[in-house]
Image: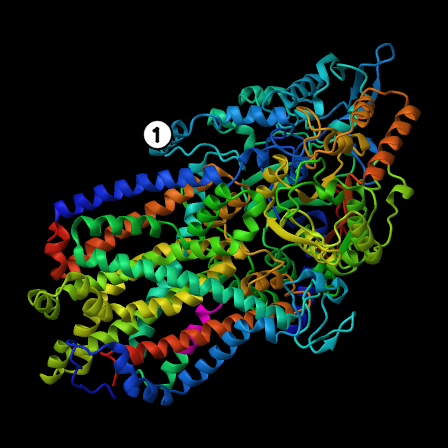
Amino acid sequence: MTDAVEPAPQSAPQPTRFQRFARSDLLWSYLRSPVAIVSSIVATVLILAAILAPWLAPYTPFDPATLNLMDGFTPPDSTSFAGHYFLLGADNQGRDMLSTIMYGSRLSLFVGFSATVLAAGLGVGLGLIAGYLGGFVDAAIMRIADIQLSFPAILIALLIFGIARGLIPPAQQQNAAVWVLIIAIGLANWAQFARTVRGATLVERRREYVAAARIMGVRPISILFRHVLPNVLGPVLVIATIGLALAIIEEATLSYLGVGVPPTQPSLGTLIRTGQQFMFSGEWWIVLFPAVALVLLALSVNLLGDWLRDALNPKLRR
Amino acid sequence: MVAFIARRLGQSVLVMLAVALIAFLIFRFVGDPVASMLGQDANQGDIAELRDRLGLNDPFYLQFYHFVLDALRGDFGISYRLQQPVSDLILSRLPATIELAVTSAVIALVFGIVLGIYTALRRRSVETAFIMTVSLIGVSLPTFLIGIGLIYLFAVELQVLPSFGRGQVVDLGWWRTGFLTESGLKSLILPAITLSLFQLTLIMRLVRAEMLEVLRTDYIRFARARGLARRVIHFRHALRNTLVPVITIAGLQLGSVIAFAIITETVFQWPGVGSLFVNSVQAVDVPVMAAYLVFVALVFVVINLIVDILYWVVNPRLRDSASGGR
Amino acid sequence: MSKFLARAAGVLLGATMLAGVAQAETVRWARASDALTLDPHSQNQGVTHNLAHHIYETLVDRDTAGALQPRLALDWYVKEDDPTVWVFELRQGVTFHNGNAFTAEDVVFSLDRARSASSNMRQLHATVESVTAIDDYTVEVKMSGPSPIYPNNLTNTFIMDKTWSEEHDLQEVQDFAAGESNYAVLNTNGTGPYMLVSREVDVETVLALYEGHWAETPPEVTEIIYLPIADNATRVAALLSGNVDIVQDVPVQDIERLSNTAGIRVETGPENRVIYFGYRFGDEPLRSSNITDRNPFNDPLVREAMALALDRDAIQQIVMRGYSIPTGVATPPFVDGWTPELDAYEPANVQRARELMAEAGYANGFTVTLDTPNNRYVNDEAISQAYVGMLGQIGIQVTLASRPIAEHSPVILNNESDFYLLGWGVPTFDSAYIFNDLIHSKTETHGTYNVGLYTNPELDEMIISLATETDETVRDATVAAIWAQVQEDRVLLPVHNQVLAYAMRDDITLAVHPENQPLMTTVTFD
């Protein structure tokens, strides 16, 4: 076993965390981890392909005017009715799978990132405040979290869709769909962060160094962000890594239930939902490729986050 | 202790009231039940009349007042879609969901904790790398795709397990159980696995993370320095200290299991409250949706209450703050 | 030796079991959704009626070609001296499942119940003034005026037992506002070929053969296990894995795979339902368009261009995989008034469509939102999506708003849609049913689904006259004239008539029913 006891790094006073990464501990750890290297390469390729889709994709599947329905169901690596070459085949609408996946990943990543940032920002902030201040503020925030947690994320999202439907006239709803999704998924997931951060803060707050800092006259806000926050980041990272994949999957699930982005501009989730219909009929490429893209994306992000967590956490760093 | 529980109870009641309001508010927005209640033959006159009879033209606060009063009596009205009392519908569907959720939660907890400890203690082994990778693939697939994949493999290709439903159930009066028949148990396997995978992964990762943290704390190091046996250190000291966050998460996850059951039940046509809810959403069956939300909230509030109390029992350091602020 | 004997015994046993199977056949029948209720007058909805047809019976019935057939009524005619009275002569010797005899009183009770305030069937009986029993087996229905097609409205109005209904306080149809559940929602007492054994809503309904049924030859199916399975893949998987025997709502993409699977066969046939696009008429600008000073759909040139952009054949071939019947008129061929001339459609012509758009002043196109359901008709969302692409080629940039039918319906019924997809079934097999709801100006009683608010007073008058016109030649001429005007104005843009597919174990024969209401009594075994 290599779990030998090593001296713990001093928890305070810290130079800024980023200075410490720059001292190439991170790079050293990265170069020693094949998983990190591979997953970061895969993630980078997928993310770049998504971001650069408008310039890299062979076709423009989000522009319906360029489609030919008769190209529908063209198998992978073949030339279609209208004479187009489709490396990964075409879906039921005659869209090039490769291009559609690139554009779809772009949408999924955008929704996933935005929703996770929203959830994490909200959850960490409220969790820190609740855990540190305690008392009435804590009770209020955690009761709100309870209410929110009483509803499954899917329900929250349906619920926010409901409100959006009430507020946005039917004619405009589709254009707002992406933003509604981000808000719905973001708001559906903040409480997980808040609960965890609060729990950790409660414990952390009792630690000697926080008491010491307080006695030294450090402002509460400063204690929160300089000292407590870094020490609760471990669990937050666990949730956030899974959270990004989760957000993408939640989007897919919402699509499965019939609320999501319009099928004319599909995300990976919508693509899987529509492709799923063709699982028994032999057009495996319509569901397989988007599913593989989604799994690769979520998996590489997860693995990368996993490694980052180990590498960043001062207590786990070796 | 009594004061603490009383306070929590009071808060829980407030939470339930708030949820009732939200449940009621939201589904007043979601859709117009009248359009789906009347067939393609309805005309404008019919529609106006039905709205009136359903009380949909009453002022908003009046509708909510009636809603809460009735809800307290367990009366959520009549399902628009199925024309049966909503409480009967939910009660008759509850055993299926509870059996599925409990089975999944047990699978998730047992395997999650065991695998979490294993991967924490042997963090460099090949098995750990394998388990961690597989677990990540598991969470990277949407639940419905996993379910359909399992159906395709085990029901269609191998034909060893049923593709849908609960199999044969035994009626125990007020509880229909699938635990007592072979087909019932067989039917439970695929949905329970599908439902547990996500929670299993989450619990496993959390146990592992917590375990790793605890193993690095001072007092474990002291314990080692004192020469205590590894086994004693790991299971007496380290595991006990990982329990606090694990209880929280496991508690929360039990609620999520019921929530996630919505998708699993839909895919496997499992006759629980989750599939009832999805069908109701599709048909804008407001009374069922509202009752379901209140029901899920109740489950969560109860679980939270238990978790809070356990938290308090397990971690004495929290006692003074939990019972009285600063 | 003993092994041989055992095997021989096994064979013998197998043979006897096979013989036994012919006596008692259970069919596990799966479709996408469950009947909403067992109360026969509470919901006017196809799936609900379909199950009810096994337990209850109607006065008249329709065969698969659409012709009216006797069921509980043996004969029906307009009273000689009074054109506003329909006379029904009833079948004798019929008993309900509980043993009560079926008489005219039951018919009076049931028709009164069906047209009561909280009944969902009352639209079909709106012109009935009173129902009277003349003797035990004769019933007269007095109408507010001559109603030549009234018997067509009776094919889904079921007859209940008066005595039983009164015992269980069922005079009124389920009233939602009353806050109580009706006994008839979960309990039945009909005259039909099957009796209810058990029912778990959304899960399983079991029916067993009613030994006392009046039919001379009992159906081959002696037990029905009815299983709603909502998810397409799960439903198909259930048949592939042998967990069900008949699957009713087979997705078009799975027809081929199922047909090629040993032990499974697929029946396909046309449904009495047309799928069409509709758009908003009138001068008021569209809600979802970038053209804010006028309504592009109100321009006949634009409507013509849109028709020419619609490649029905491509939709049939790719989206529907050949399982649809493209059409140029918004009525299925089953309906009186349909003609092959109306049915013909111009082939798609994008070039010409673009010219028309330019001529109409929309050379740069415009934007609009298309509202489509995504769980109601066969591949509804994919049809709309395909049309979005086709419209894109003539410059109309469409945003697709795809919703489950329960959310699509309010948008449609509240006239909040600029452009939409809808399907229309015609249970009366008569054009008037289409005109009343889709073409007539929107009023309290008519034009409920005239989503585009098309209005033409002349047509309205002609449509109203159909209800009371007794001269068939005049009526046919009026119907033809209305259709001509509807086609000229391009009030609706029809796509195709829906085709249904049923998949089943290959020793089962069940023909596709044009109203998608297959009866298990028609099932035969090889």
Left or right: residue A218 compared with residue C61:
left
Closer to us: C322 or C34: C322
Closer to us: B291 or A295: A295
Left or right: residue C221 compared with residue B142:
right
Q: Main secondary structure of the magenta part?
A: helix
Q: Residue furthest top?
A: C81
**Residue B203 placement (x, y as % from top left):** 33, 67
Q: State the residue position of label 1.
A: B69
Q: How many marks?
A: 1
**Residue A155 placement (x, y as % from top left):** 43, 50
Residue shown at 62% from the left, 20% from the top: C116
Under mark 1, the amino acid is: Leu
Local crowd size for mark 1, using a 10 Å CA cut-off: few (<14), some (14–19), many (≥20) = few
Residue shown at 56% from the left, 66% from the top: A104
- The answer to which quarter of the image holds residue A14 is bottom left
Chain identity of mark 1: B
Left or right: residue C511 compared with residue A291:
right
Closer to us: C15 or C272: C272
Question: Where does the magenta region start and end?
Answer: B132-141
**Residue A49 placement (x, y as % from top left):** 55, 75
Q: How is the image coloured?
A: rainbow
Magenta residue check for A85: no
Q: Does the rendering let one see residue C409?
A: yes
* Mark 1, secondary structure of its residue: helix
B67 lies above or below A26: above
Q: Does the rendering let one see residue B180?
A: no
B107 lies above or below C348: below
**Residue A117 placement (x, y as % from top left):** 38, 63
Left or right: residue A248 compared with residue C417:
left
Magenta residue check for B139: yes
B207 lies above or below C320: below
Q: Residue furthest left?
A: A215
